[in-house]
Amino acid sequence: MATLILVRHGRSTANTEGVLAGWTPGVHLDERGAAQAAALPARLASVPIAAVVSSPLERCRETLAPLLEARPGLPVETDERIGECHYGDWSGRKLGELAEEPMMEVVQQHPSAVVFPGGESMRAMQARAVDAVRDWNARIDQKHGEGAAYLMCSHGDIIKSLVADALGLHLDLFQRIHVEPCSVTAIRYTRSRPFLLRLGDTGELGALVPPVEGPQENGGSGDAVVGGGAGAP
């Protein structure tokens, strides 16, 4: 069966501003995010990619632009099922402000019980993303043969939920997973089980260095960054 290459979008203006973007329109890559996207074709140069599937949101389309320019004719389609979680009334709000919401503890400790006000449940988010991957695995196998690789450009919580599914982890454990902006995660699917080949690979180790002062973005307080965070400084 297919090998899925998951790319989180490059760093966005919402990431650097500490805002939970969700489906808020007009969120674009910042300068660093654009540089991350520009480096993506070289990072994937040795990988034969049969097709590309993108979240419909601008930051994902901008992340893919350099890769598609480097590989003219590469088929690309949009699938709303791998779009960001619908955070509803939380969308567009500062993460620091949301940390004070009583529901944030549930988001951190029991995400399978979370339904965002005016939005969707985290269970529904994972289910639609997993359904999308199953559908695309079948399409890629049928059109390109078993063993073909394809790429999906999506979002932090979506990718984390797909990794949890591949590892057989309950959704309540998915906050233990972290993926940096423009990181590459790879899952090879077989008839019996998926294999996680890469997780959050950025090709650099700066994110492993603790900051000299101040809390770490993830790990300092023990809380995960909802939406994925801005990555290493």
Image (cartoon, rainbow, N blue to C red):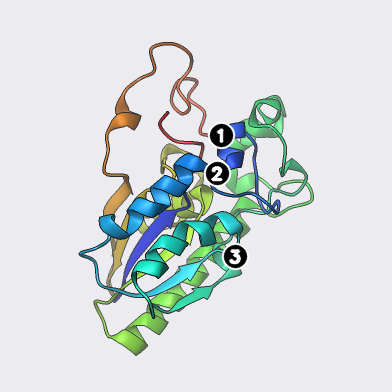
Relative image position of residue 64 (x, y in whole percent): 45, 62
The residue where tag 1 is placed is 16
98 or 34: nearer the viewer: 34
What's the distance in space between the residues labelled 3 and 1, CA to CA?
21 Å
The kind of residue on which mark 1 rests is Thr
**Cβ–Cβ below 8 Å for labels 1 and 2?**
yes
The image shows residue 172, relative to residue 26, as above or below, that is above
Q: Residue at x 44, y 57 (%)?
A: 162
Question: Against 49, is 85 above or below?
Answer: above
Give whichever of 132, 57 is nearer the camera. 57
Instruction: State the SS at label 3.
Output: loop
Q: Residues within 10 Å of mark 1 (few under 14, many from 20)?
A: some
Q: Secondary structure at mark 1?
A: helix
Q: Helix or strand or loop: what does disc 2 sit on?
A: loop
- Residue 49 position, x and y percent, is 31, 72
- Classify the position of the N terminus by image quarter: bottom left
- Whether residue 194 is situated above or below residue 149 in the rendered picture: above
Residue at 38 percent across and 12 percent down: it is 212
Distance from the alpha carbon under mark 1 to that under mark 2: 7 Å
Q: Amino acid at mark 3?
A: Pro
Q: Amino acid at mark 2?
A: Ser
Residue wearing tag 2: 12
Q: Which residue is mark 3?
A: 56
Q: Is residue 111 above or below residue 138?
A: above
